[in-house]
Amino acid sequence: MAENPGKSAYHHGDLATALLFAVDEIIREKGVGSVSLREAARRAGVSHSAPAHHFGDKEGLLAAFAEQGFGHLSEVMTTAMAGAADLPQLEQMSAIGKAYVKLAAEYPAHFDVMFRSGLDKSKYPSLHQTAEITFAFLHERTSDLVAQGVFPDANPDDLAAFFWSLVHGLAVLWVDGSLQAVLGDRTLDSVIEGALAAPSLFAGEQP
């Protein structure tokens, strides 16, 4: 996790960064329910009115935090895809899935707000659009798998739902500590690679 920008970030005009870092700290330490505008302001070293002026209310602050998380997710998946561009299609999907799970492990507070806080994304157009972009990216990859004959009879929508459910389930189980409890000293990389290799058992022959 990055160093807390605190007051220095605020004095340089980056109030949003300081406040969102404060939200990250609060959630990691105490959970989403402990987030408040007042506490975020205190940790960021700014006036109590600053967060409300910038984000409106607590839900607006959490929406901005979730949008930041989806931005991170889009970035790591795109980077993973670029790094695996010369690999077979299923290995590309594995690289994207690994990036997804690792992001959840590295940014558990963001992951919690993005998917498990009950935040109504439809109320925040920018957040909604950013979240939709990540799913569109995944859908494009599964459409490629169908078009190139890896899963020739699959519906791209269903395949996207399958892969998303797989990597998201892995992420939740890892962040919650459930996989570590039953798999012992297996590393995160080995768990992800093993789970994401399973779909190849059902795939058609790759071109």
Image (spheres, rainbow, N blue to C red):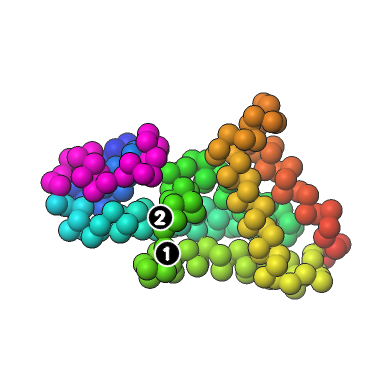
SS at badge 1: helix
User: Which label was assigned to residue 121?
Assistant: 1
Q: What residue appears at the point 82 percent right and 71 percent down from the top-left corner?
A: 153
Location of mark 2 (residue): 66
Horizontal side of residue 94 vs 205, given as left or right: left
Q: Which residues are magenta?
A: 27-48
Q: Is the residue under label 1 in contact with that under label 2 (CB below 8 Å)? A: yes
Indicate the position of residue 198 as horizontal and vertical percent values.
78, 49
Q: Nearer the viewer, residue 20 or 29?
A: 29
Kind of residue at disc 1: Lys
Please tell me in which quadrant of the rendered image residue 194 appears: top right
User: Which label was assigned to residue 71?
Assistant: none
Q: What residue appears at the point 23 percent right and 38 percent down from the top-left corner?
A: 43
Please tell me in which quadrant of the rendered image residue 178 appears: top right
Q: What residue appears at the point 31 percent right and 45 percent down from the top-left corner?
A: 35
Q: What residue appears at the point 36 percent right and 44 percent down from the top-left corner?
A: 33
